[in-house]
Structures are given as structure tokens and as C-alpha cells.
Amino acid sequence: MKSKTLTLSFIASFALASSAMFAEEVILDPIVVGADFREQNLSKVAASVSMMTEADIYDKAVHSSIEVIAAEPNVNFSAGASKAKFIQIRGIGERSQFVTPMNPSVGIMVDGIDFSQSALGVSMYDLKQIEVLRGPQGTTFGVNGLAGVINIESNDPSDEAGGHIEATVGNYHTKAFGFTFNTPLVEERLFARFSLYKNTSEGYMNNVFLGRKDTQNIDELSAKAKFRWIAADNHTIDVTLQHINIDNGYDAFTFDNSRDSYADEPGRDAQKTNAVALKSTYEVNEAMHLVSAVSYSKSDLEYSFDVDWSHVGRFDDALGPYSAFDQYLRERKQLDIDVRLVSDEPVEFFTGMTDWTIGAYYRDYSEDLSRHYDFIAPFSSVYDTKNVALYGQLDTHLSDRLTLVTGLRLEQWESEYTDSQKVAIETDEFLIGGKIGLSYQASDKRLYYIALAKGYKPGGVNADNRLSLSRREYNTEALWNIDLGVNSTYYNDTLKSRFNFFYGKRKEQQVNDSLVIPKNDGSTEFVGYISNAAEGHYYGLESQIDYFPYEDLHLFTSLGLLQAAFDEYPNNSAMTGRTPANSPEYQYNIGFDYRFLDGWFFKTNLEGKASQYFSNRHNEKADAYSLWHASLEYTTGTFTASLWARNITNEVYYVRGFGTFGNNPANGYATELYTQLGTPRTVGVTLSYDF
């Protein structure tokens, strides 16, 4: 595996070196990144950023949003129920949540609304773009940006009346319908955009006992209304309303790791969210503008499953079978307020002209949990957090080509935890993050940059009273990261490349751990909790190349290389020096898009990941895999028909795994590996009409 990684790294480095020999003058790309304090063309962003534009996204509404995003370099995911909803960047990120409240490592923002805790509700319909920011985003996002941020923007309302209708049918009884309508309400002043998307599927499990094929079903509804009000020539107000209703099935695990389930209580993976966001952009004068953003969301979630993966009567009583059901009901509420002043004209500062940003942020988050598990008394907990931050950034232009970027964020974090077992824990922390970097615009076709950033993730509390006092709390994690990169374009803008080398050092690294508890019937259960692994590090490469040899042909490739290890792991010395879970040494995405004849469009790509550990408490691994996708599309301008297929070869791969407990009475509850299978081959047809 090491040799394969080194080979891929050599190829990427050679591509960088050889492409530089053929440099020509170019026109830079128009793709705009909006997640930072001020919008920039992608080629001028001095950071490791990936973009998925509307052209990349529009035909993927029926697919899992997290799995689609995880095709980007060094972005990964894990599932556990109906579909993936936990994401990792450079090996950092959560893989599950049970009774313990969670502070996310990867931020997920959708139209200014925080979905970091509720990624199941992220829809791929009617999107404008997805931005993937890798590395700590301590200045811009604070506690939610330790590993990086996923920023998702849907299409904005405009002054043109029109709409879009689409319908999809596919195998596994997949059916989807989408409707979008855009209209001006007041000429040149008030515009509205409404979208509705419904997606259903029976899922990929066959429940033999219940005689059903829909116990891991998909049943998702997403509705959105966006309004843009030009209140004055210098003042714009945007309002977003969103409603999400998801009622998916859980049924995911079996004793033989197949798709044939025998569970009598398959469970649910459900989410209902109502959210609103308001953003005001006010031009104070020619030198600055004021951005004020407020968002509020309320989510009700259920995560429930058959613990024994079986049914009463399947095993002889002499084998000691058991029956249990576990249900987690959560109510989450979150209020975010962000106010910032952003310069429009640079001011003289130190030795150069400086663009500046200064802002303040407030968040109030609460999570109420009610757990119902057959083997313990009903359990409830309340977790409240409040954080206040001041932040600022200076972009000092030391010369026409050299820019110094300095950012700082000061954040006060407070949390309160109480539960029905009379446990009460409060935390109070002062957190500091930021960055310092240099970018050098060598020419219109090439940008070099280097940046050092610090991110942080607050400590927290483990909820289960079966843990010792020393395991009930865990400490804040800090990440120091350095990025070194170059963005280039060649051959009259037909070849574009982004290369980023990175190194990170993790202090008080937070990891998912578990305590295995034997039961009287011979089976075992594990209590999950979060601990600190003292220290860790990672390094690697992210590269993306787009080549347009002809007007109708687009070749693309992306590569992520990652080497990560625990430097110290006091709670489990066997893990010292080992790679953390969900940190594949390589992942890639390579393919092409081709337009031919009159209105025909063919797209295909191959994406893959290296072998990776499932957990930090055992050495079981998921095998390396490659997935082949393709679509054939015909369009007349207003009407489009698309025939698509994903995982064409029906590759068997795993998206979640457990390896240190036994759950099968038939083999005496022997410890073995249990896995969840990834999405099999799916095919379908999507018809759409623009009006």
C-alpha cells in the first residue's frame, strides 16, 4: 500500500512539474467561492478548496448528498442506518452518535443555516454550488470548522419568471419528483423562488422475517422558499425558509453481513427540520458594507434499531438469545447571529494597502435527548451550549503580487449538561483560532500560497453513567495545519490545476472509543464515548486537474493522498503509531464529459478509496474499492432526458463496521466483524422540463 501511495504521489508531482513547462497566458476562471469573508474566483483562493458547480450537481438530486460530496479529495464518510450522514475531512470527523452529545468536526452550512448536526437533511436539488474547504477554518467558522467546512448554496431568486419540473424512476422502486418556480413579485425589487423535492425508494435490504423489502427505505421531502428584496440601491435582504421531512428505515446490519435481514423491529432514521435564515447586506458607504445574518432551526430526529438484529423464536433458548430495541429521540434548536463589517476599498496599514473584516458572532444551541432501551430505565438529557466570538481578518497587499493574510478569532464557549441520572456538568472555555498566510500572484496564470492555521473543537461530556468519572469528560482539541499550494492555468485556459500539500498536528485529539460490557446471557454490549488520544499528525496532497482539449470534451481528475497516525494514545497503547479510522491513504476521481451529435451528452467517472480502518478500538478494515458511474443525456434546451447508472459493476464495499463485540447466539456470541454494505448498482431515468 505504501508503494502504491508513493507512486500516485510521484505521478501527481510529475504532472505539476511537466505542466509548468507549457505555460501560456490565460483568462482565469469565473467560478466564485463565497464561503470566505469576500467572494473570490476559485483560481485566486489561497487555500485547499474544491468546487462542485451546478453543472456537476443538477443530475444528482436522487443520490446521497454526503456520498456525492465525498468524491472530493480527502473527503470521506460513514453511514450506519439508511444512508451516510457523517463526514470526515483528512481523516477528522465523527462516524456515529448515540447517547453522547456531539460537537461536530466538519461544519455543514446550507444557505446560511447550520446543518453540521443534521446532515441527513441535506438535499441535492436545485443547488447552485458546493464548496469544500479543507483544513481548519478557525477564523471564519470557529468551533464547527476544525477539519473543514462544506458550504452549500442553492439557486437564488431572480427577476426572470420560469421554472423547472423533473421526475425520476429507477430500480429498487426509486421514484422522485422535483418542482421549482421562480417569479418576480415586485418589478426590480422583490423576487421569489420556490422548490419542492420528493424522493422515495424501498432501499437495499430484504427483510426475510417480515417479508418486506422496504425496511431500509428512503422517504424524503424537502421544501424551500427564497426571497430577495432590493430594499434600496445600497441594501439587499435575503430570506430563506426551509422544511425537511425525512422518514427513512434503519435496517442495516445482519449476522452474515448480507442484505438479508431477520430483524422484527427494523427501526427508523428520521428527521423533521424547520429553518429560517435572514441576511442583510447594506452598503454603508463606498469604503465598506455591513453583513448581518440570523438563522434559526428546529429539528426533531429519531434514530432507532433492532439491537439483536433478529426476532424472537429464531434461536433455541439454550443458545441464550435476547431481544432488544434501542430508540434515540432528539430535539435540536439552534440560533445563530453573525454581524460583520467588510471593507470595499483598501486602507493603508503598515507597509501596504489592506482589505479588512471585523465581526461578532453568537450561537445558542440546545439538544434534548430521550432514550428508550429495553435493558435500562428510560434516560433523558439536556445539553445547552452558548458561544460568543469576535473575529477579524486583514488582507495586506505588500505589493501588486504579494499579499499577507492574518486572521484571528476569540471565542467564549459555555456548556451545561444534565440528565435523568442526576449528572450535571458545566464547562467554560476561552478558545483562540486564526491563520497567517502569504500568497504570491506570479502572473495572471499562477498563484502560489502558504498558510498556517489553527482550529479548535471544544471539549464535552460523555453521557453514560456506566463510565468511570475519568471518562465522563474530554478535553478541547486543537489542530495546527500548514498548507502549501499552487493554482495554475495553461493552454489558453484549457488546462486548470490546483495542487495543495498539507501537514497537520493534532493536540488532545478527540476520538470515538468504547467500553465492552459482558452481559449475563453471554452476549456483550459496548458503551461508546469520546476520549482524548493525546497527539496525532497527518500530511498529504490534494490535486485537481481539468482539461478541455476540445470545446465538447472535458477530462478531469482529482487525487487525495493522506498519511495519518496517532503519535500518542495513552488509553490504548496498541494504537500508538497506527492510522486513525476513516483515513484512507488515497482516493481518486477520474473521468470525462463529452458532448456529441446535436444535444447528446455522455458523462462517466471512476472514483475509489484505499483500505481504511473502521474504528480506533480495533484493527478491522474496509477493503479498497472503486465505483464506476455513467450517464447518457439528451437535451433540446427545454426538455432533457437522462439515463444514469451508479456503481455499474455492482462493487461490494462497506460504509460502516463494528469489530469487537459478538451479537450472534448461533456461534456463542463470538467476537467478529459486522459491516454495512454500500449502495449497490442503481440505474434510472430522469426527465426534466424548463419553462
Image (cartoon, rainbow, N blue to C red):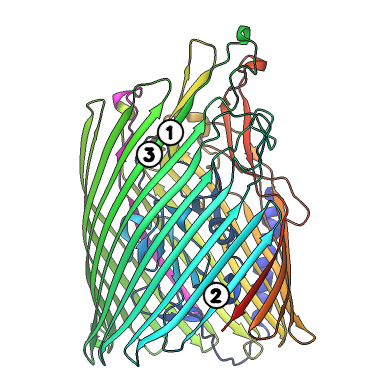
Is residue 152 rendered to the left or right of residue 677? Answer: left
Which stretch appears magenta?
447-469
**Which residue is under mark 1?**
327
Q: Considering only vertical position in the picture, is 607 above or below 268? A: below
- Identify which amino acid the numbered label 1 is placed on: Gln
**Which residue is under mark 2?**
53
Q: Is residue 209 visible?
A: yes
- Identify which amino acid the numbered label 3 is placed on: Leu
**Which residue is under mark 3?**
329
Badge 1 element: strand
Q: Per the image, is 358 magenta?
A: no
- Could you say which is closer to the camera, residue 419 or residue 540? 419
Give the image location of residue 106, x and y in percent: 42, 55
Q: Is residue 61 visible?
A: no
Q: CA distance from mark 3 to mark 2?
A: 36 Å
Who comes first in sequence, dot 2 or dot 1?
2
Disc 3 to disc 2: CB gap under 8 Å = no
- Could you say which is closer to the camera, residue 98 or residue 208? 208
Looking at the image, which residue is at 57% across and 54% down?
562
Q: Quadrant of residue 533?
A: top left
Give the image location of residue 197, x and y in percent: 52, 64
